Amino acid sequence: MDIKVGSVVKSCAGRDKNSYFVAVGISGGFVEIANGKERKLEKPKRKNIKHISPTNAFISTEALTNRKLRKVLNELSTQGFKQP
């Protein structure tokens, strides 16, 4: 999978299944994801890379706040994401 920091991903397993997040960190076989609401940028969720699916969307993480993150994810979800 080609997931980088700033990639918008879809959760495929777990309690947050079918929710969209942005990758804020990558280490080993895990990705740290946040959506600005349940999972803030200050305390991202650590998720196995096998349990997420990348989309074609990308968000710059420079000067990103929880409010901006929620707004961007909401706008992108209303437009519809494209799965690669």
Image (cartoon, rainbow, N blue to C red):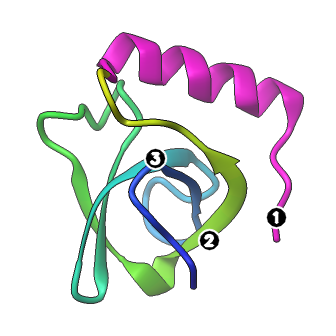
Mark 1: secondary structure = loop
The image shows a total of numbered marks equal to: 3
Residue positioned 53% across, 38% down in the render? 59
Report whether 5 appears left or right of 70: left
Mark 2: secondary structure = strand
Question: Which mark is on residue 22?
Answer: 3
State the separation of the CA atoms marked 1 and 2. 8 Å
Image quarter where the C terminus lies is bottom right
Q: Position of residue 61 (x, y in %)?
A: 37, 36
Circle nearer the N terminus (1, 3): 3
> Mark 1 touching mark 2, by CB under 8 A?
yes
Circle nearer the N terminus (1, 2): 2
Report whether 65 appears left or right of 72: left
Q: Quadrant of residue 43?
A: top left
Q: Position of residue 37 (x, y in %)?
A: 36, 24
Neighbor class of circle 2 (other Cα within 10 Å; few <14, some 14-19, many 20+) is some
Residue positioned 32% across, 32% down in the render? 38
Residue positioned 35% across, 27% down in the render? 36
7 or 21, nearer to the observer: 7
The amino acid at mark 1 is Gln
Which residue is tagged 1? 83
Mark 3: secondary structure = strand
State the separation of the CA atoms marked 3 and 2. 11 Å
Q: Main secondary structure of the magenta part?
A: helix
Circle nearer the N terminus (3, 2): 3
Residue range (magenta): 64-84
